[in-house]
Structures are given as structure tokens and as C-alpha cells.
Image (spheres, rainbow, N blue to C red):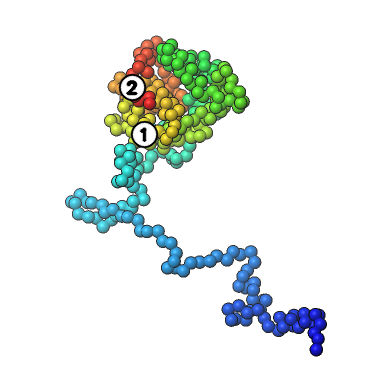
Amino acid sequence: MSLSMSSLCDGIQGLARSRPLQLSEKKMSRSDLPRRIRPGIRVMATLPQDMQYKSPPQESRTIKTEKGSSSPKTNSVAFETVARKAPATSERNVSTKDLPLEHPQVSRALVAADAEHPEGTPGRNPRDYTVLQQHCAFFDRNNDGVIYPNETYEGFKALGYSTGISTLAALVINGAFSYPTYDGWVPDLRFPIYLEKIHRTKHGSDTEIYDTEGRFVPFKFEEIFNKYARTKPGFMTYEEVMYMTDSLKNVNDPFGWSAAKLEWGFTYWLVKDEEGFASKEAIRGIYDGSFFEYIENQMKRGDKSKIKKTELSKIDSKNMN
């Protein structure tokens, strides 16, 4: 007997209706599916307990008591600042003490805050400038937001530097930092530095006390004294300043190496006291520009002891490499 195509299809459909879907040898009707697999909910596969990754237990170091006996209390390695197989971490250790400053890791846009000055320099008006802009604004002698080479020269002269040093500073600073602050493709041969874009001049191999937008990072400022001020807390010698610039070098960054040496060289010879120490307070004043204003006022009052004539001759040439 011949079987037509239509009757064959009807037979298959009838068979499907009479036998519900089977999964894992268990009958499952259509009404069961929403209960087992809910629409819109992700089904996550979970590994068996013995196959799941477990981090290895942390090493614990026993604390010795004053009598030399071992205390049952242990100190977790989570807050260790020294790795025994990395000598640099021991040579340049960091403090684990809490700073008396609220949120020291938060970058300050308007003030150079540290542990002693949580509100920044007392009485200072930031004029809505970032701390980096405040640092540079001292050299904007006519306050028009643009620093030309002659203004850089005048700023260094106002700080007591000699004519030769001031001329060199104007050539180097405006020559290096003008173009990054300029929006055009063709360099402006007047070599202006625009304060609005001064954050673009941040270079590598620096302390990172200024962030990439020109804000001031308090814990980074505290860190350089924790690491490098070994002779006298809160003060740095010339050797410690140069050691710091060596330690901060990034690989393949000759521009950053040179810029850091020059910047810190000028800074040290400007702020050092009679004993040869650069104080934390004076360096903080360099960052927000307040120390520049202090020196200029001293010079106007006739304090000729602030005149700087031999800065670069005292900087060892081997440290400039």
C-alpha cells in the first residue's frame, strides 16, 4: 500500500504529541521548562569544591618579645615594605605610619598639603590655579597666562640668580616646554609657555608629586622624605637630593633624567640653609610657588645673601649624566 507524504507527516506529528521530551531518562513536559531554566537568568557552571582554585596561605612571621621568646601573635606579610631579595626596598624603605592628614592619597588641585599643613600654605590665594600652575605663575610677570623667555629670565633674576644662569634658564625652560603647551602644529618661535596647558609639560623620571593634571599628591611628597632624608628627618642634603634623582630614573628617558637633575639642582641651591640642608617646608613652598614670592620679597628688602652665583659650577658634572 502506498503512503502519501501528507499522511506520513501527520503520523510523525501524532507520535511527537504522544511522547513528551525526555532528558536524562526523566519525562519532562513543556510546563516544567520555566521552573528549571528561567528566562533572563544566567546559568553559572560551578566547579566541584576540590577543583576550585585556592590561594596559598600567607606567610606569617613570628614576633619576638623583649625577652627573646616567640610570641604566639603573628604579623601578616600584607603590610611588609621590604622584600628580602630586593635590596632597593631596604635602601629606600617607606613609612607605615598613618599621616595626620585626611586622605593623603587624594590629589589636591588647589593646595600643596602635607602633614604639617593640611590646608596648604596659610593665607595663600590659589586663584583657581592648580598647584603646578601656581608654581609656574611666578614667572608670568604680567599675569596674562603666557610665559615668554624674557619673563622666565626676569623671574630668575628676581630670585637672585646671576645674569648668565637666568639667561640659560630662559633658553632651556622655554625651549623645552613651549611646544607641549601649544595647540598648533608649527612651533611658535617666540617660545611662549601657556599656563592653561602647563600640565602637558610633565616629564618622566620625576617624583610624581604633581599628577598628570598638575594636582599635588600629599603622600608622594611625604614619601620622598621618608625614603631619602636620612641625615636629618625633614631635611635633605645635596647628596640625598642627587641620590633621589638617580633612584627615580625611568628606563630610556634621557630627557627626564636631565630635566630632573636641573630642576632639583636649581631647587636645592635656592632653598638650602647655612648648614647645607634643604628643608621640607621650603621644598613644599617651591611646589606651590610661595617660596619664590618669599625670596623675591627678601631680595627687594636688600638681602643680598640670597644671590645665587655658583649653582651650576657646584653641581658635579657626573651627576648630570
In the figure, is residue 279 to the left or right of 150?
A: left
Residue that label 1 marks: 247
Q: Residues within 10 Å of mark 1 (few under 14, many from 20)?
A: some
- Give above or below for 104 relative to 318: below
Residue placed under numbered mark 2 in the picture: 316
Q: Write the residue at 52% across / 16% down.
A: 149
Q: Determine which quarter of the picture holds residue 104.
A: top left
Where is residue 298 drawn, in percent x and y?
40, 15
Residue 46 placement, left or right of 27: left
Q: Is residue 122 visible?
A: no
Residue 315's tag is none
Residue 41 position, x and y percent, is 61, 64
Q: Residue at x 48, y 35 (%)?
A: 211
Above or below, 145 relative to 16: above
Residue 94 picture quarter: top left
296 sits to left or right of 34? left
Q: Type of residue at label 1?
A: Ser
Q: In the rendered view of the protein, which quadrant contains the C terminus?
A: top left
Residue 90 position within the rendered picture, expressed as x and y whole percent measured from the top left: 30, 41
